[in-house]
Amino acid sequence: MTTMTNADQYEVIGGGFTEPLLAAAAITTGDRILDIGCGYGATTRAAALRSGSGLALGNDVNPAMVAAARESSAGIPNVTFEAGDAQIHPFPDGGFDVAVSRFGVMFFADPVAAFANIGRALRPGGRLAIAAVGRPEDNDLPALLASAIPGADNVHALSDPAYLTAVLDDAGFTEITVSPVATTITLAGGPEQAAGFLSEWGAFRDFLAPERHATVIAALARAAQPFRTGRGIRLRSSAWLAGATRPPSHHPRMP
Ligand SMILES: C[S@@+](CC[C@H](N)C(=O)[O-])C[C@H]1O[C@@H](n2cnc3c(N)ncnc32)[C@H](O)[C@@H]1O
């Protein structure tokens, strides 16, 4: 049993991508930032800090996570949170200078419509910077989870950089760049501890039926075995960092 909060667990898994994401977002003082699928709000708070006199709004479809993010951000005047489905949420038109997301944009039923909705929330010339889970062969964690529960590796919707580029293009963005970024996820202890950690992590727990708990933990521990090192379970983690711009003035596309 881990003593970490779920918010801490998300940082163990995704924390290595915060700095590259925020560097790509090129936030400047006064920027108004929208953080899509913000989860517990760590990136929202980090983005707000970089914006100085600006502000950051964290959006997430999960109201419980939004409530927890709000609680952790109490006292930070330029951070707010709002629950809503980013695919259709009525963000203020042109209300933000920058939209960011650390792994919150890979679960859309219609990615083009969703990114078009996010694009509308940006002012003309506003920037998008997202991290999306990279190719399956460069990521150990999704396969490890799926070996215990088939389907638990549902994070690869934007793993093909050509498809990711096409989605952003179809959604109306310009100046699209996609570059790889990689880090290592370290889970403390041996395979059993790693299995315990993962079985409690919110992103996986949803897949875990209580009556299968023991079986799944055993399967996770077996799958973690090959990644055992003297410094814990070490997993390769790779993402695409995509940058894009809402065109300065919006011209409808020619057919
Ligand atoms: C892998 S988690 C990443 C959370 C957070 N960005 C982080 O890096 O810790 C994905 C997040 O996206 C959110 N999400 C999924 N679909 C969404 C949607 N349609 N609109 C808004 N948030 C969504 C989930 O609730 C979840 O918090």
Image: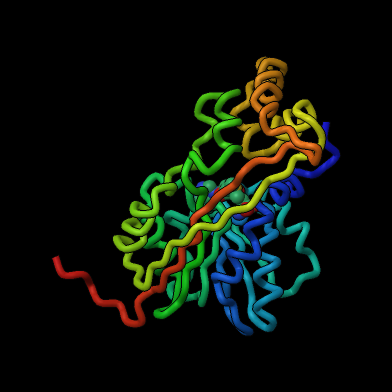
Image quadrant of residue 245?
Answer: bottom left
Q: Residue at x 47, y 61 (%)?
A: 179
Question: Left or right of 194: which side holds 147?
Answer: left
Q: Residue at x 71, y 74 (%)?
A: 49
Q: Residue at x 56, y 36 (%)?
A: 142
Residue at the left extreme, as displayed: 255
Question: Left or right of 146: which side holds 197?
Answer: right
Image quadrant of residue 148?
Answer: top right
Height in image: 93 above or below 44?
below
Q: Position of residue 181 (x, y in %)?
A: 55, 57
Q: Position of residue 83 (x, y in %)?
A: 58, 55
Height in image: 86 above or below 94?
above
Question: Left or right of 212: which side holds 1?
Answer: right
Tell me if I can see residue 83 in this picture. no
Q: Position of residue 173 (x, y in %)?
A: 35, 68
Q: Quadrant of the C terminus?
A: bottom left
Q: Residue at x 60, y 30 (%)?
A: 145
Q: Position of residue 74 (x, y in %)?
A: 79, 64
Q: How is the image coloured?
A: rainbow
Height in image: 247 above or below 232?
below
Residue at the front extreme, as displayed: 230
Q: In this view of the protein, which residue sits in the foreground, 169 or 6?
A: 169
Q: How many marks?
A: 0
Tell me if I can see residue 218 in this picture. yes
Height in image: 189 above or below 252?
above
Q: In this view of the protein, which residue sits in the foreground, 80 or 132?
A: 132
Q: Quadrant of the N terminus?
A: top right
Image quadrant of residue 55?
Answer: bottom right
Residue at the right extreme, as displayed: 3
